[in-house]
Image: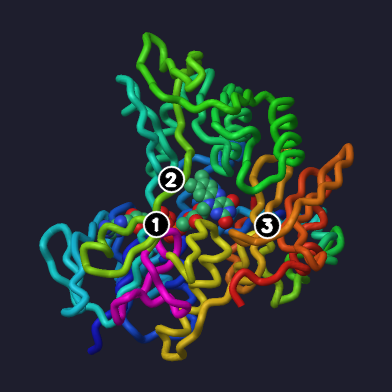
Amino acid sequence: MKKWQCIVCGFIYDEAVGLPEEGITAGTAWADIPEDWACPDCGVAKADFDMVEV
Amino acid sequence: MSHPIIIIGSGLAAYNLARELRKLDTATPLTVISRDHAGFYSKPMLSNALAGNKSIQQLVMKSAETMASELNATILAHTEISAIDAAAQTVTINDGRVLPYRDLVLALGADPIRLPLSGNGAAGVMSVNDLDDFAKFSAALEGVKTVAILGAGLIGCEFANDLLARGIKPVVLDPSNWPLSRLLPAEAGERLAAKLTEAGVEFKMGVSASAVDAIEQGYALTLSDGSIVTADLVLSAVGLRSRTQLAAAAGLTINRGIVVDRQLQSSAAHIYAVGDCAEVAGLTLPFVLPIMQQARALAATLAGTPTVVKYPAMPVVVKTPACPTVVAPPAIGAEGDWQVEIADDGITARFVGSADELLGFALIGAATSQRQAMAQQLPPVLV
Ligand SMILES: Cc1cc2nc3c(=O)[nH]c(=O)nc-3n(C[C@H](O)[C@H](O)[C@H](O)COP(=O)(O)OP(=O)(O)OC[C@H]3O[C@@H](n4cnc5c(N)ncnc54)[C@H](O)[C@@H]3O)c2cc1C
């Protein structure tokens, strides 16, 4: 399980936790997040997420 | 060859616009000019960098060189624009060179507001509004035990929480009665204050600093009620004012920010403004979400498809881990009332209009999990 961070706002997506409030269940790998998903904090599209592993 | 699109500034507004533009137009020459280092960094991360133990080097995610090659752009760092000639479509840089543009985008940001403080320590009061400020601030924290923070707004509360990670005691001063007073109803603000206090922050509400004097060790602040607070360092976080001077000198229409229309065009043809310096449809919103909306709209316009900017509802996450908080304030002047539900583990505050419609909200603690669901019920900020 990895964590990914939005480089624009610092939002962290933790695969182990998922985003239950958005219907993304715990354990969802970054690769399995839909392509049209956007950062909940700043609106950057997934395609632009130069995510960094933390 | 056509003249370039020139973007002044290298903050999130400038670089997000450049990235969006390059998705639509890879050919038009692009020049980014900034008086700072022009490296790409995330400004929001500055107020939780201490907890994350981030060095200045780590905060710069991409150097100006990397950005230049990724964006296929010319980047002029440490280069200040001193004048704009809207009629001639040129800008003058500080070494006297005059550069022509096809279109000019002002992404100049905002200056921290400085309170009119008396005292011989006033000049030592710091503010953190960019990476260079943060570098100075974090260097000054060496050996510091207490930091007085002027202002209990978003930035003040975030830095207060972050300083705790370093074992430093923050003392937050604000003339209002509870933190984030412009965004939160009393109950929510009081909960935020209680949680942060529990974590180690001291709040002095209902007072403001009138003088800052340098003393043997640090500073003595004289407050409006006559009392005195001492601290090793003073950080001011009392708000921002759009950088409008350059635009004003060029004859552009200015109000609180550089006035632009829904296509982000200023009162002069071929000059646009985005980010903290821009006033869009009467709104100056110094946050990342509006910047992303602006960047996408203006990129399309500059690539040949005139596009108006729209804002969805834009909740703001307050980065105070000691008390998770999300705010979506109602529009200025919106009529309605706060309805507040208080639970042990959180607070749900709804700002509701006369037809029982949701116009804004504030969520504290466990209630922040409703953010997404509630944001969907809010009206868009700009349709
Ligand atoms: C500590 C902190 C935390 C924040 N946290 C959040 C958050 O969690 N969520 C959120 O949504 N927002 C947050 N914000 C606000 C957000 O970061 C800003 O709205 C955003 O970064 C502004 O970007 P900008 O590009 O408009 O301005 P800036 O980043 O200030 O960029 C302005 C640029 O213009 C250049 N410049 C200015 N004048 C000239 C000139 N004459 N010639 C050449 N160059 C010039 C500067 O060098 C700079 O590169 C935070 C802000 C701060 C300070």
Q: Are marks 2 and 1 on the same chain?
A: yes
Which numbered disc, 3 or 2, marks the residue that appears first in the sequence? 2
Amino acid beneath label 3? Ala
Quadrant of the rendered image containing residue B83: bottom left
Amino acid beneath label 2? Asn
Which numbered disc, 3 or 1, marks the residue that appears first in the sequence? 1
Residue bearing mark 1: B109
Residue at image position (57%, 76%) is B310
Question: Are the residues at dot 3 and dot 2 in contact (C-beta closer than 8 Å)?
Answer: no
Residue bearing mark 2: B129
Asked if the residue at label 1 sits under 8 Å from ligand 1, the reply is: yes
- Magenta stretch, residue numbers: B258-278
Answer yes or no: is residue B39 visible. no
Residue B166, compared with residue B286, is above or below; it is above
In the image, is B270 to the left or to the right of B99? right
Q: Residues within 10 Å of mark 3 (few under 14, many from 20)?
A: many
